[in-house]
Image (cartoon, grey):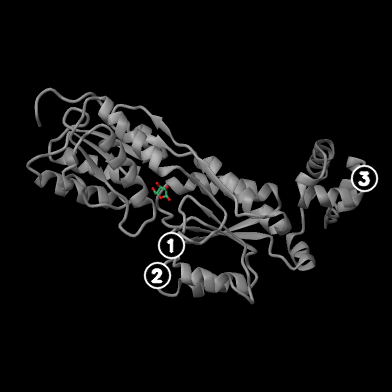
């Protein structure tokens, strides 16, 4: 029988990199605390020796799971996949794993969360779902367990927690101004879900831009809302019933914009001939639609990376945190063919 090769140890890595074992261990668990030169040498030595960290032993030693729990509002929405990818990569760089929980709001959400932390399966919480009940979150984060938490994308009002988000009011106003600049004056809006914190923010950007241009909003142009394909379908059904239809629509996310367009298409309306639409998010499919969707691109990779960095910094150096961190990023208008100048003939 072939003898099993002995697994490389931390000492092997140190010998290869010509540094102390303490430096190797620091480079692996707190890379930001060693010089670039040492980090690079350790990295090369890890690859050359095929060393792998014994995560279970490390967790036992440190009484830490070295895992963060991320909570997504809707795992089916591909908006979150790029964020999740960035979170996973940033966490791995810092020696952490990631657990995913989908939509934890509603009855028993706090209980489900507590299970993760009481059983020491996660050390910190990356929360992307602003609809999580604040009372439950408070109960969870109060003694005897205190869970370091960072919010991403969706804010929880009065929670006073670190957050990495985008400026939703500004981005919604930008999207609406784009339609106004194309000559549209009858502009409708598909809002987010009624209970989502982003809904009033994006609605307010829309109404501000309309008011700044001196354009009235017929209340009927605020269509039924939601962040799903089916929400867009429902908005389209209502749109088709209107006698005084808008010529353009700003949708609070891409999924609802796509559901809206496909339903209108089934009823013989073409985009952008009969209606212009601008979405929000820039999910991957947006560029492959017919026509490709004009949208506000949120910096998803940066959102995930910065939020994860903030959480791991909080876990590793809680003493460095004074006021809760607040990072607000900008979104970018991506011009594609779903928006066009106002059609001459009324639809
Ligand atoms: O599409 C889903 C929405 O929820 C995004 O626009 C995002 O900001 C998120 O929180």
Left or right for 312, reference 43: left
Q: Earlier in the sequence, mark 1 or mark 3?
A: 3
* Residue 225 left/right relative to 53: left
CB under 8 Å between discs 1 and 3: no
Is residue 82 or residue 30 the one in the foreground?
Answer: 30
| Residue that mark 1 sits on | 103
Give me the residue at 77% from left, 50% from top. 30
Q: Secondary structure at mark 3?
A: helix
Q: Look at the numbered discs 2 and 1 and tell me whether their residues touch, using CB distance below 8 Å.
A: yes
Query: What quarter of the picture does the C terminus occupy?
Result: top left
Q: How many discs appear?
A: 3
Res. 331 visible in picture: yes
Q: Quadrant of residue 293?
A: top left
Q: How far apart in space, not on screen, are marks 2 and 3 (Cα)?
A: 53 Å
Judge: label 3 CB < 8 Å from ligand 1: no
Q: Residues within 10 Å of mark 2 (few under 14, many from 20)?
A: few
Residue bearing mark 3 = 15
Query: Could you tell me how far apart the alpha carbons at marks 2 and 1 are, in whole angstroms?
Result: 9 Å
Looking at the picture, tell me which residue is in the foreground, 282 or 4: 282
Q: Nearer the viewer, mark 2 or mark 3?
A: 2
Tag 1: Cα neighbours inside 10 Å, few (<14), some, or many (≥20)?
some
Q: Quadrant of the N terminus?
A: bottom right
- Residue identifier under label 2: 106
């Amino acid at each position: 029988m072939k003898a099993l090769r002995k697994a490389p140890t931390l000492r092997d890595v140190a010998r290869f990199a010509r540094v102390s074992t303490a430096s190797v261990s620091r480079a692996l668990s707190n890379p930001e605390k060693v010089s670039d030169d040492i980090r690079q040498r350790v990295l090369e030595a890890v690859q050359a020796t095929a060393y792998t960290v014994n995560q279970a032993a490390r967790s036992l030693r440190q009484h830490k799971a070295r895992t963060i729990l991320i909570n997504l509002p809707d795992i089916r929405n591909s908006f979150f996949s790029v964020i999740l990818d960035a979170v996973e990569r940033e966490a791995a760089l810092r020696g952490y794993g990631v657990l995913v929980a989908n939509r934890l709001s509603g009855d028993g959400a706090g209980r489900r969360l507590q299970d993760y932390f009481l059983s020491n399966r996660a050390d910190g919480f990356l929360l992307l779902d602003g609809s999580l009940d604040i009372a439950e979150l408070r109960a969870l984060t109060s003694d005897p367990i205190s869970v370091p938490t960072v919010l991403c994308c969706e804010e929880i009002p009065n929670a006073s927690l670190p957050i990495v988000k985008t400026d939703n009011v500004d981005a919604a106003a930008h999207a609406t101004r784009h339609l106004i600049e194309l000559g549209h004056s009858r502009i409708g809006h598909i809002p987010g879900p009624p209970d989502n914190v982003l809904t009033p923010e994006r609605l307010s950007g829309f109404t501000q831009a309309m008011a700044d241009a001196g354009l009235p909003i017929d209340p009927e142009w605020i269509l039924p809302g939601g962040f799903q394909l089916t929400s867009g379908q429902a908005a389209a059904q209502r749109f088709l019933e209107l006698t005084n239809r808008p010529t353009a629509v700003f949708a609070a996310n891409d999924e609802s914009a796509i559901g809206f367009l496909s339903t209108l298409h089934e009823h013989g309306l073409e985009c952008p001939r009969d209606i212009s639409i601008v979405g929000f998010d820039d999910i991957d499919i947006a560029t492959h639609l017919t026509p490709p969707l004009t949208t506000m691109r949120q910096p998803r990779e940066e959102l995930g990376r910065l939020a994860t960095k903030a959480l791991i910094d909080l876990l590793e150096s809680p003493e460095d945190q004074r006021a809760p961190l607040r990072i607000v990023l900008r979104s970018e208008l991506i011009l594609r063919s779903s928006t066009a100048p106002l059609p001459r003939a009324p639809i």
